[in-house]
Image (cartoon, grey):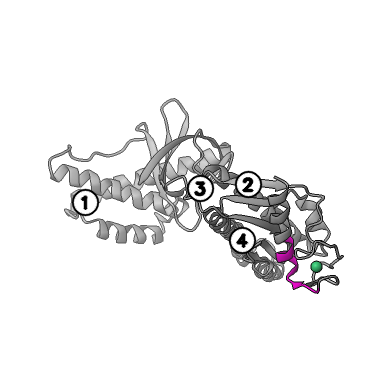
Amino acid sequence: MQKGLKIRLYPNNSQINILNVIFGHTRFVYNYFLDYSKNNKDYKYTSWSKKLTELKNNEETKFLKEADKFALQNSLRNLKTAYDNYFSKRAKEPVFKKKHNTQAYRTNYTNNNITLYEKGIKLPKLGIVKCKYGKDIRDNKIISVTIKLLKSGIYEASIIYECEEQTLINTGKSVGIDLGVRKLITTSDNEKYISELDIDRLNNKIRKEQKKLSKCKLHSNNWNKQRKRLAKIYQYKDNYMLDKIHKATKAIVVKYDIIYMEDLDIIDLVSKQKLKKQKRKMLTSSLGKIRTLLEYKCEHYGKTLKKIDRYYASSQTCSNCGKTYKVKSNEIYKCPHCKLIIDRDYNAAKNIINYGLTHN
Ligand SMILES: [Zn+2]
């Protein structure tokens, strides 16, 4: 089922400039093809769409590339609908759009190009626009967003989103979660989510592209191209991680009713490791997001998140015999008392659930 939500936008001056450009270009496209179809008696969307691509490559109209590509396509779709309604006698013949008409365009969701944050929304070409909304739909899949400048001067976005069932079936199962550095999440059922290797791979890619950039002549064409490329990879990196975190936290919330997690100091946890600055930054923000999204999803889906005392030494206690043993961060846990040999993070997650179950 699809639902709609209107949110208020607070674009800054440079975003207002970009919005004006996109409003103008979508209007241009609408009017251009209205004119074209009248003159050529060609009312086919596919041929308009093909012609639009040509326009973007023409010297005089290549400015169209500045606009969000979905906004332009949707402008054609709107024209198509207007004609369909006209030909089936449901509406009058479409007319040219003027600047004083309502300014609006619609963009579509693809590859994380639109993301709703707590106080902002990321939109194509605009970056993050400050916004306010009542209902939190961050866990829903966004389908499209229509951005409008109302006569009152207020900017508004209408979000169409996929509405899922918001309560999950109770499974009667509990789980302990250990947040770590090598695997970001390990559960007491020994399931692991998100590896540091994902972060390494992304960082290596960035380093490679940065190196290329440093070899380009400053402000040259290649330098500009490479800079844009790098910016894209940076954005991809954030989206990629966020997507992984969303999937992992959702999977956990689906599977368990009660989730126990150590109430740990993430900055402290990460700073104990010898890591490159980029990786440390990414780990800190990813672990923070895991925690935030687990909290948020538990509430959203009617599950329970319980935090346990951060001073409880989950990693140094044997989950089998309860005695302690100081294990180093990259080692397998080998209990000298009961001879248990177990993955260190799995051991910690088991301790977390044991502690949670006995201290409640
Ligand atoms: Zn033991």
Q: Amino acid at mark 4?
A: Lys
Image depth: mark 1 or mark 2 in front: 2
> In whole angstroms, how far apart are the C-alphas of marks 4 and 1?
43 Å
Nearer the N terminus, badge 4 or badge 2?
Answer: 4
Range covered by the magenta-colored residues: 339-348
Q: Amino acid at mark 2?
A: Leu
Q: Which numbered mark, 3 or 4, is in the foreground of this view? A: 3
User: Do the CB atoms of the residues marked 1 and 3 lie less than 8 Å apart?
Assistant: no
Q: Earlier in the sequence, mark 4 or mark 1?
A: 1
User: x, y (%) of residue 257?
Assistant: 56, 50
Of the two numbered discs 2 and 3 in the rendering, the one whose residue sits closer to the viewer: 2
Residue for badge 4? 237
| N-term-proximal mark, 3 vs 4 | 3
Find the distance from the CA under tag 1 to the CA under tag 2. Answer: 59 Å
Which label number is shown at residue 305?
2
First of labels 2, 3 by sequence position: 3
Disc 3 packing (10 Å; few <14; some 14–19; many ≥20): some
Which quarter shows the C terminus?
Answer: top right
Which label belongs to residue 139?
Answer: 3
Q: Residues within 10 Å of mark 2 (few under 14, many from 20)?
A: many
Among the two numbered marks 1 and 3 on one chain, the one whose residue lies closer to the N terminus: 1
Q: Is residue 120 above or below residue 228?
A: above
Quarter-wise, where is residue 235 in the image? bottom right
Residue 157: image tag: none
* Residue 248, image x, y percentages: 57, 59
Query: Which residue is under mark 1?
Result: 37
In the image, residue 224 above or below residue 13: below
**For marks 1 and 2 on the same chain, the one whose residue lies earlier in the sequence:** 1
- Residue 29 coordinates in the image, percent (x, y): 34, 48
